[in-house]
Amino acid sequence: MSETRTETAVSRALATARGEDRAALVGYLPVGYPSVEGSIEAMRTMVRAGVDIVEIGLPYTDPLMDGPVIQTAATGALAAGVHVDDVFRAARAVTDEGAACVVMTYWNPVLRRGVEKFAADLAAAGGSGLVTPDLVPDEAADWLAASDAHDLDRIFLVAPSSTTERLVSTTAASRGFVYAAALMGVTGARSALGSDAAVLVDRVRQVSDIPVCVGLGVSTAEQAHQVAQFADGVIVGSALVSCLVDAPDDLDRGLARLDTLARELAAGVRR
């Protein structure tokens, strides 16, 4: 692991939030829904509303982790012809808006483009790294090398089912933060949060000092506040995507709802 690498914008955003004695807010949206331009404007809207880090989803035909809301948006984006290149356009737009960003992608699109080329293009667009839900560190040699070469973060996932040995190996390979999937199963807003998230974060902290961001299930300001009490970052996906999915033919209305919810969530992590 490089000892002289340049700190990414994600690491700076997490450090800034920590300096303000709060968690960072990480907002997920897929590129391409309801259109490429519409999705980029939605990401800009989230940044202006207080989202610290944008997680840009790359729509994929065979998602393993995505719940019904995100699948609806991803299917619409693919039908509209979203392309891998669009994720780099989105990364540049988010960076220019003043926020950090990472790309969440299944591994096949990265392999098809070429691991080295994907990393180079992401770095050139100002992206900080990748969230790779279907890639484990043991099988990530090419990505570890490419992320080192381009000073990118590699964000692997841990779950309540992860053994202590897996937590040790995954956090050692991760950079920027580790993604704690607080609930087992696919993504989606929950009406209530269980205790799995806090237990998982505590287990990670016993083996590593890497920042821990918690995803899956947060949909309200109160839930964001609760997670912010023990995590370094609060990841919100389905609830934000719903703002656009529920207004499929009215982008302005979807953006207005997105702005309102993102501001509420941002206030939640800042309480």
Image (cartoon, rainbow, N blue to C red):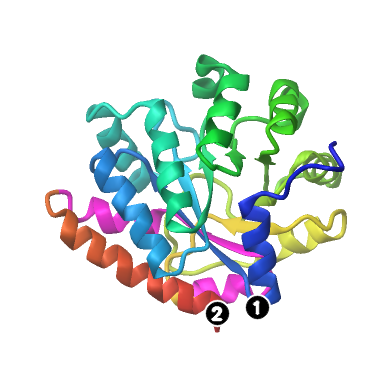
Question: From the viewer's perspective, is 68 left or right of 196?
Answer: left
Give the number of callouts. 2
**32 relative to 113, above or below:** below
Q: Which residues are magenta?
A: 223-248
Q: Which residue is mark 1?
A: 20
Q: Is residue 240 magenta?
A: yes
Q: Is residue 221 magenta?
A: no
Determine which quarter of the picture holds residue 57: top left
**Does the CB distance between marks 1 and 2 fall below 8 Å?**
yes
Residue appearing at x 25%, y 47% in the figure = 38
Disc 1 and disc 2: Cα gap in Å? Answer: 9 Å
Q: Secondary structure at mark 2?
A: helix
Q: Quadrant of the C terminus?
A: bottom right
Q: Which comes sooner in the sequence, label 1 or label 2?
A: 1
Question: From the viewer's perspective, is 161 left or right of 243?
Answer: right
Q: Secondary structure at mark 1?
A: loop
Residue appearing at x 18%, y 54% in the figure = 251
Rendered location of residue 125, percent (x, y): 50, 38
Rendered location of residue 55, percent (x, y): 49, 49
**Crowding near the residue tagged with mark 1, few <14, some 14–19, many ≥20 C-alpha atoms within 10 Å:** few
**118 relative to 17, above or below:** above
Identity of the amino acid at label 1?
Glu
Identity of the amino acid at label 2?
Arg
Front position in the image: 271 or 75 = 271
**Crowding near the residue tagged with mark 2, few <14, some 14–19, many ≥20 C-alpha atoms within 10 Å:** some
Q: Quadrant of the N terminus?
A: top right
Q: Which residue is mark 2?
A: 270
Residue appearing at x 79%, y 46% in the figure = 171
Rendered location of residue 106, percent (x, y): 52, 30
**83 relative to 243, above or below:** above
Determine which quarter of the picture holds residue 265: bottom left
